[in-house]
Image (tube, rainbow, N blue to C red):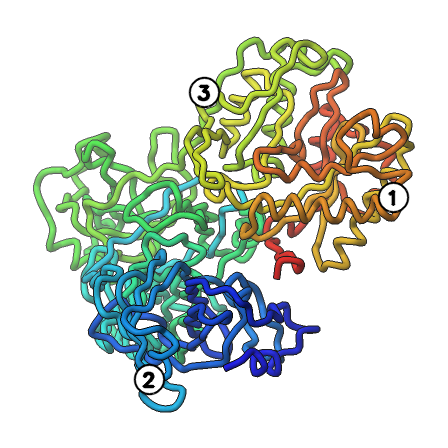
Amino acid sequence: MSLQRYRKKRDFTKTCEPKGRTLKQHGKLFVVQEHHASHLHWDFRLELNGVLKSWAVPKGPSMNPKVKRLAVEVEDHPIPYADFEGRIPKGEYGAGTVKCWDRGEWFPTGAPATSQLRRGHLEFELKGKRLNGRWLLVRTERNNWLLINRGGGAEVRELPAFIPPQLAALSKAPPVGPQWIHEIKFDGYRTGCRIDHGQIKLLTRSGLDWTDKYAPLASDCQGLKAESAYLDGEVVWIDGNGKSQFQGLQESLGGKNLENIYYYVFDLLYFNEEDLQSEPLKERKAALKDLLKNSNCKRILFSEHWAEPGRDIYKAACNLDLEGIISKDSTSPYAAGQRGEWLKSKCKHVQEFVIGGYTLQANTRVLGAILVGAYDPGGMFRYLGRVGTGFGGASLLPQIKRLVVKKSPFVVHPPPRSRSVIFVKPQLVVNVEFGAWSDAKILRHASFKGVREDKKAGEVFVEEASAVKLPKLSHPQKILFSKSKSSKQDLATYYRQIQNQILPHITRRPLAILRCPEGAGKTCFFQKHVQAPGILNGKFKVEKKMEQLISIDSIAGLYALVQMGALELHARGCHLETASNPDLVVFDFDPDPSVKWPAVKRAALRMKALLDHLQLISFIKVTGGKGLHIHVPIEPRYSWTQIKMFAKTLCEQMVQENPDLYTVTISKAQRHGKIFLDYLRNGNGATAVVPYSVRAKPDAPVALPISWQELEDIRGSAIFKLATSAKLVAQRIDPWDGYFSLRQTIRLFS
């Protein structure tokens, strides 16, 4: 096929797909693209005779040599299509999102590839990241082929019988940082769904088979279009107000109100012969969303997530009287247990406890209170208080009576002696809501919510939110900024007050710090490699070379930097995990002293117009020095060279428009009377001052984000100071709202 059919199907004024042409090159590129169109499928492409021979594989390539996949031959595509990733607009052919699933080289085996294709039988070898070894394409009829793994390829991992769940640790507040996403915390039972060629199993957090108890859900899972899969989620009972109710779930397990149970799924750990546990969470959730979108299941619901600041999601959840939120590192793989990559922030104090005793109401056989505890880190059972309300119609007493013992099971801080207390074996796990803890770690205002049949008593530990330990400052009253008389303690306090604003801009980004141990205006030096508590150190691959990079991910890290006299914070436009691919473009407007401030503002507005034309949303900040910075968040898919050249192209366009005012020449001798458009901020290893960072000047100015509307009234770059900025930030609406959820593609590279 020629490229004529390819071009005829597309309107290149609307789609950003490459128009392309047949090339004379004879490379051996292969690419598999995941295509989220009206139906999810995988496009399998082999470079041959200057084009990409292409097949649509509805279920994707199989690692199993025993499985044959349908591959429908489609029109040839141009070679540049191998680099295409992005969204094809609605209404266009193939509308939907395209992203690279695998790529590498291919080599035909036996006769030349062209003659093999004519005969409808192509044997070849793949060398990719996912696909390797010998493969075969066989035509069955017209454009229908079979794609077959002939062995020697990627290892087929069997569908696990059970995957222990990843757990969330309790946190005093939602974490801060662009990698964190946030979900609603449900009040139900953690459940894994195992699908093996039509056989459904619903498993508790400890691996018990509860498929029969969840019969309506098991039936609905049959509608999931997967040959094999393992989902992770929470079974809940939804009341008339749309909220999950634990007591209702308890009753449904006894056969009541089964029509109200639903399965909210938030993770996909295995799908069609591929183990996804090592993939980043954001990739697993995207695959899960596609699976549900292409299936017909009324009771299986996708657990939505948000990338907005956790504090906002948490506040909204509490206002809706929900349990709280779960925050997850979207870049992390899946691993059993608590690892700190999942954190829960609760609106209500709700925890599991183990019953260790009970009392009866005076002169009756009615349950009066239960005595509860949990295990400490040393495995000792600790008394934590009494629960005397919330039993209602719960048939709890018969279950407790079966466990009566003579000796108290409480080893640590046992309850006060009382003849009315009847002790039991610590086996029954219950959910309890309470008001607070006393100083002696005893429950206050506690109410029974229900029995946890899915959890073993030995798994119940005292749950405490981890508190961030801040490094101690030496000489906290030392003056670091002579003109403003601001001390080291003032600087640390400022960062503590605006931590929710600054941390997302620096968390796990490679840093360079300007250290001035004796204060601003004294001897200062840049440093990229330091050792201190709270500071991350490690080797990361940046464009094929290993570099030692530092970063921080908490207020403790900020305090550590203040302690060592870091007055300015500068960051690269990337994150540690994707250090070879920037996710930020920065335009720096650096005026010569003779240039008036209004001209600098006009320069920034002209650049905004150029970016608007490219459909790129931009944000602006004063630098606390002489000029302005424009930030453009982007998808981390481009190289440093590409981004630097993109920035240079736009800056050079402005120079061509007004060479008397703008320059891209770094030489100061040639910058007199001009604004230096510094595109070099986007080179590999280059940094830019962090939003909200203080600058190392005697009057302690701050590099502060502003809105484009505010720019008109701003009188200079250094008007915001350390002493007043924290209060200003607390009072105003965030001028960069939506910044961290924005990941843009650059049309010039599409």
Residue 203 has which mark? none
Tell me the SS state at disc 2: helix
Which of discs 1 and 2 lies nearer the camera? The answer is 2
Tell me the SS state at disc 1: helix
287 or 349, which is in the foreground?
A: 287
Residue wearing tag 3: 531
Kindly identify the amino acid type of the residue bearing the numbered disc 3: Gln
Residue 28 in the image, given as x and y percentages of width and height: 41, 63
Mark toward the start of the polypeptide (1 vs 3) = 3
Residue extending farthest to the bottom is: 141
Mark toward the start of the polypeptide (3 vs 2) = 2
Tell me the SS state at disc 3: loop
120 or 663, which is in the foreground?
A: 120
Kindly identify the amino acid type of the residue bearing the numbered disc 2: Arg
Residue wearing tag 1: 602
The quadrant in which residue 11 appears is bottom right
Instruction: Report how far apart the C-alphas of labels 3 and 2 lie in the structure.
Output: 64 Å
The quadrant in which residue 531 appears is top left
Residue wearing tag 2: 119
- The residue positioned 73% from the left and 48% from the top of the image is 649
